[in-house]
Amino acid sequence: MAAALGHARAFVGPVIHSLSVSKLEITPLALLIIDPQGKINKLVKLEPDGLAEQLDQALDHLPFCLDRTNTTHLNLGEFLIPGFVDTHNHAPQYAQRGLGQGMHILDWLSKITFPNEAKFSDPAYARKIYTACVEGFLRQGITTASYFGSVHAEATKILADICLQKRQRAYVGKCNMTRNSPDFYVEKSAGDSLRETRECISHVRAIDPAGRLVKYVITPRFAISCDEETLKGLGDIRSENEDLAVQTHFNEAKQEMEETQRLFPQFGGSEADLYQEFGLLGKRTILAHCCYMDEHELEIIEKLGCGVAHCPIANMTVGGGFMAAPVRELLDKKIKVGLGTDSGGGFSSSMLDAMRQAMIASNAREVMSGGKDKGLSIAEVFYLATLGGAAVCCLEDKIGSFEAGKDFDGLIIGTKGADQGIMTMVEEDDTLETVFEKFIMTGDDRNIVEVYVKGQRACVSTS
């Protein structure tokens, strides 16, 4: 089904994508045309009657050559959706997924995570795990990921190389950790941390100069692990490189928040004031978790245009707080929100599971708020996993929906046949909306038939 690199292609079949946070467009029959650069030329709604004539009319007189053999007619039970956007993912934790559930966050880091991430000092180990990680997330339909790496510069460069090789769109950042970390997993000094950060920035720009797929993201793990010299230096790097994104953890759990306040008493417990002071907040900042937000902090991140990576699976299973972000309140305030799998921080690294857990968490918040914060709908969590996540990453003009001019990052979803797992069976009288709902609520990676990034098949091993 795949066309050669640089060739135009087209898809004919059902198409589903978000137009806004609450508006889902479901088209039973459409033509999606992709140009040789991997961009969406047009999305044309079709009627079953006179299909051949409609296709001829739409495909004639294109500003580029499209070989009709590169037109894919989706099979019965298949439909197209945009690729998923994972706004918060720890790539080194791919091999520790599911461990330490129920532990408080700082205990989980010291006993489970830091010993695991220390192994990435070995480049061969890093390459093995990162290859499995990137391929694994691509197989789950995650076409874009914002990755925290380990503290190791060489391993972070390897992660960036693999993302580019496998054709996963990615933000990749080396963790900055200069204190409050074990001796076997801490950087020697702020100077070393900042120097290696600059090396990684240079490497990512060298392998993908235009940033078409892979970009660097400044990554202070959290304030607890960074001294003031490191935070100031990272803020300086950001001011020198306005195209760079920033990612960090923010108000994740009470234990973490209390320790941050002890280390930075001058900010009165406000992580927003802390990160703003060091020049790390802005429209390209991704704040993971945001479980406990007061009006002051909401006002700051709204004003500065920061995005929130909502990680409902991790927040309900690791951390000790068992509280998820106030997504309804964030959306009402027009704050950008996407979903994060958080990789090792939960019972599943599936974006489908993240959507389901987001609905569960929002229903719990609705009960706790006395009905004020309404639970999220399927349309809304799908938006968070696609167009909302793209907005958090400041990529909404490039991906997240099938709007003309955007890159084609998409998934072919299959819902019929023995290879489609244990998703709720599709019946003859099911509407496309019903089939979509069954996929979101009961499907898994076996329903993801093909994965496309920037118009081309992603490189995922079938062995």
Image: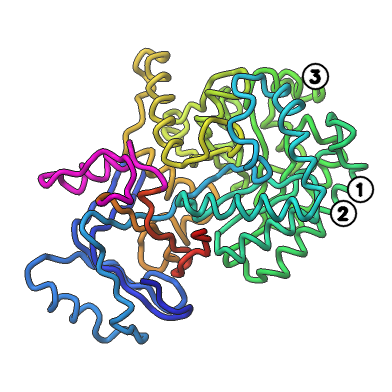
Residue receiving disc 3 = 262
Circles 2 and 1, Cβ within 8 Å, touching? The answer is yes
Amino acid type of the residue tagged 1 in the rendering? Gly
Q: Residues within 10 Å of mark 2 (few under 14, many from 20)?
A: some
Report which quarter residue 360 is drawn in.
Answer: top left
Few, some or many C-alpha atoms within 10 Å of disc 1 (few <14, some 14-19, many ≥20)? some
Q: What stretch is highlighted in magenta?
A: 417-445
The magenta stretch spans residue 228: no
The Cα atoms of the two marked residues, 3 and 2, are separated by 28 Å
SS for tag 3? helix
The reply to whether dot 3 and dot 1 touch (C-beta < 8 Å) is: no
Q: In this view, does 229 lie above or below 68?
A: above
Circle nearer the N terminus (3, 1): 1
Which element type, helix, strand or loop, lies under badge 1?
Answer: helix
Identify the mark at residue 387; answer none if there is no mark: none
**Residue type, label 2:** Arg
